[in-house]
Image (cartoon, helix red, strand yellow):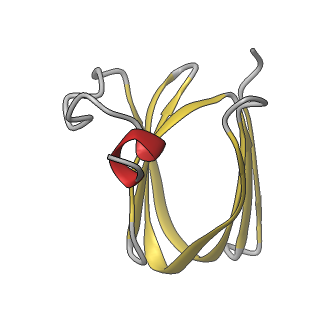
Amino acid sequence: MEHRLSLQDRKMLSLCGIVDVIRFDLNEVLLETEIGMLHIKGSDLHVTRLSLEKGEVEMEGTMDSLSYSDAPAFEKGGAGLFGRLFS
């Protein structure tokens, strides 16, 4: 799967190549991508569209930083977003 990131005016973010959503709240999002972990920090962050089947996510809010890591998802806690929501 191809990994692609598009950021418009620090307010709208589109990503392809997402494997899982590890954690999200209004100030930070942690995503597992095809090329490593992606940590997004900002304010008033909202996921507007999510399709794990297609590996796509769209977000709105103010993006202050985006950083990639090759580290495995040590914060994963053994379950994905939907596993935690419906457990």
Q: Is residue 86 left or right of residue 58?
A: left
Residue 79, image x, y percentages: 32, 33
Q: Is residue 62 above or below residue 68?
A: below
Q: Is residue 63 above or below residue 24?
A: below
Quarter of the view holding residue 42: bottom left
Question: Which residue is located at x 70 percent, y 76 percent?
Answer: 11
Residue 23, image x, y percentages: 36, 52
Q: Is residue 44 above or below residue 64?
A: below
Quarter of the view holding residue 68: top left
Residue 14, image x, y percentages: 76, 53
Q: Is residue 42 left or right of residue 23?
A: right
Question: Which residue is located at x 76 percent, y 75 percent?
Answer: 9
Question: Which residue is located at x 77 percent, y 19 percent?
Answer: 2
Tally of marks: 0
Residue at the far top in the pictured view: 1
Question: Which residue is located at x 67 percent, y 73 percent?
Answer: 10
Residue at the far front in the pictured view: 87
Residue 73, image x, y percentages: 29, 28
- In depth, the one of 52 and 83 nearer the eye is 83
Could you tell me which quadrant the N terminus lies in?
Answer: top right
